[in-house]
Amino acid sequence: SMANDTIFGRMLRGEIACNEVYSDQHCLAFRDIQPQAPVHVLVIPRKPLESLRAANEEDTELLGHLLLVAARVAKLEGLDDFRTVINTGAEAGQTVFHLHVHVFGGRPLAWPPG
Ligand code: AMP
């Protein structure tokens, strides 16, 4: 899959460093290099899915796990309230084509987003 070739794929293979906050058999969570809030963490599957639109029935458990890890990371970071975001496709703001869940918090977050 092309998702192997992204910067996140390189992090998963240990080729480049990341600021890790959580890791397990199925996913990795690390701090965003350009944080948009006091807490801004990305949770990514080890499986190289290019985006949410590339996921299918066999990924059901993995997708649930990513959300539970997002909530765990929020708690680890001391957040009660937080926002999770998945951008799918360039027009929706996706710039790295390896599925990732953003976890934002630590300041009031406006709604709707841009
Ligand atoms: P998106 O725009 O939804 O695809 O999100 C990609 C995110 O990855 C952006 O928030 C970037 O700041 C972040 N990012 C890009 N490169 C790195 C990196 N080397 N380490 C950590 N975060 C990164």
Image (cartoon, rainbow, N blue to C red):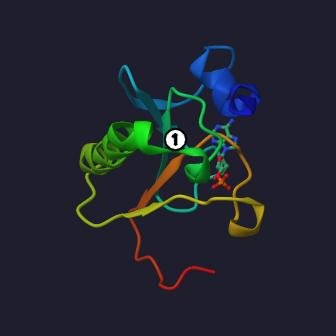
Which residue does the image show at 54% across and 46% down from the upper left? 100
Which residue is identified by label 1? Answer: 31
Position of residue 48 measured from the top left corner of the image (x, y, whole percent): 60, 30
- Other residues around mark 1 within 10 Å, as few (<14) / some (14–19) / many (≥20): some
Spot the residue most to the top: 14
- Which part of the image, by quadrant, shows the N terminus? top right
> Label 1 amino acid?
Arg
User: Which element carries disc 1, helix, strand or loop?
Assistant: strand
- Mark 1 CB in 8 Å range of ligand 1? yes
Which residue does the image show at 28% across and 57% down from the upper left? 79
Position of residue 97 measured from the top left corner of the image (x, y, whole percent): 70, 43
Tell me which corner region of the image, top left, top right, bottom left or bottom right, holds residue 94: bottom right
- Judge from the rendering whether residue 84 lies leftward or rightward of residue 47; answer left or right: left
Comparing 59 with 40, the one in front is 59
Which residue does the image show at 60% across and 46% down from the upper left? 54
Which residue does the image show at 60% across and 53% down from the upper left? 53
Q: How many marks?
A: 1
- Judge from the rendering whether residue 50 lies leftward or rightward of residue 22; answer left or right: right
Spot the residue most to the front: 57
Position of residue 34 measured from the top left corner of the image (x, y, whole percent): 65, 51
Comparing 112 with 34, the one in front is 112
Comparing 81 with 87, the one in front is 87
- Which part of the image, by quadrant, shows the C terminus? bottom right
Q: Is residue 11 above or below residue 78?
A: above
Q: Is residue 59 above or below residue 87?
A: above
Position of residue 61 measured from the top left corner of the image (x, y, whole percent): 32, 38
